[in-house]
Amino acid sequence: QVQLVESGGGLVQAGRSLRLSCVASGSLFSIYVMVWYRQAPGKQRELVGSISSSGSTNYADSVKGRFTISRDNAKNTLYLQMNSLKLEDTAVYYCKVGGRDFWGQGTQVTVSS
């Protein structure tokens, strides 16, 4: 069992930046693929991007060039740096262990005009 706790969400103006964090329990964080998802009101949950154990990243087209996923294995922490935020980035953001059904509780990001 892995517990994931997201933080860093909040209300931010369009065009600004925000960084989300996800702290994982346990000693195996460094070997996991980690994934960020988001779910906007009334919409299905969608993949934001992922990072492999070696640090390779992939992103959804909607966030490519604006969002950056990184990890600090020494701190068991996953990050999502979000720049140039848009209104449509408003959602609850979740971290997840790739290939496993371990999810965080989510953190709300609201982008205002």
Image (cartoon, helix red, strand yellow):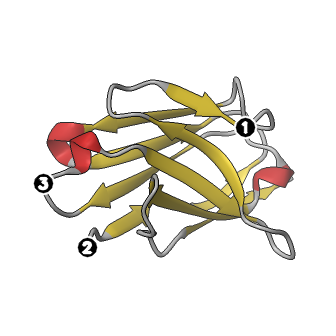
Residue 64 lies, with reference to residue 41, above or below; the image says above
**Residue type, label 3:** Ser
Residue 24 at x, y = what percent? Answer: 27, 59
Residue 113 at x, y = what percent? Answer: 86, 53
Q: Quadrant of the N terminus?
A: bottom left
Dot 3: within a 10 Å radius of its alpha carbon, few (fewer than 14), some, or many (20 or more) residues?
Answer: few
* Residue drawn at the location 23% of the way across and 41% of the way down: 30
Q: Is residue 89 left or right of residue 80?
A: right
Task: Estimate the spatial distance between the alpha carbons at disc 2 and disc 3, rounded to whole Å.
Answer: 11 Å
Quarter of the image where one finds residue 15: top right
Q: Secondary structure at mark 2?
A: loop
**Residue type, label 1:** Ala
Mark number displayed over residue 1: 2
* Residue drawn at the location 33% of the way across and 34% of the way down: 53
Q: Give the camera-side residue of 104 and 108.
A: 104
Task: Estimate the spatial distance between the alpha carbons at disc 3 and disc 1, rounded to whole Å.
Answer: 29 Å
Q: Secondary structure at mark 3?
A: loop
Residue 104 visible in the picture = yes
Comes first in the chain, label 1 or label 2? 2
Residue 53 lies, with reference to residue 111, above or below; the image says above
Task: Estimate the spatial distance between the alpha carbons at disc 1 and disc 2, rounded to whole Å.
Answer: 28 Å
Residue 28 at x, y = what percent? Answer: 18, 51
Q: Nearer the viewer, mark 1 or mark 2?
A: 2
Residue 109 visible in the picture = no
Residue wearing tag 1: 60
Residue wearing tag 3: 27
Q: Is residue 25 left or right of residue 77?
A: left
Q: Secondary structure at mark 1?
A: loop
Residue 109 at x, y = what percent? Answer: 65, 61
Comes first in the chain, label 3 or label 1? 3
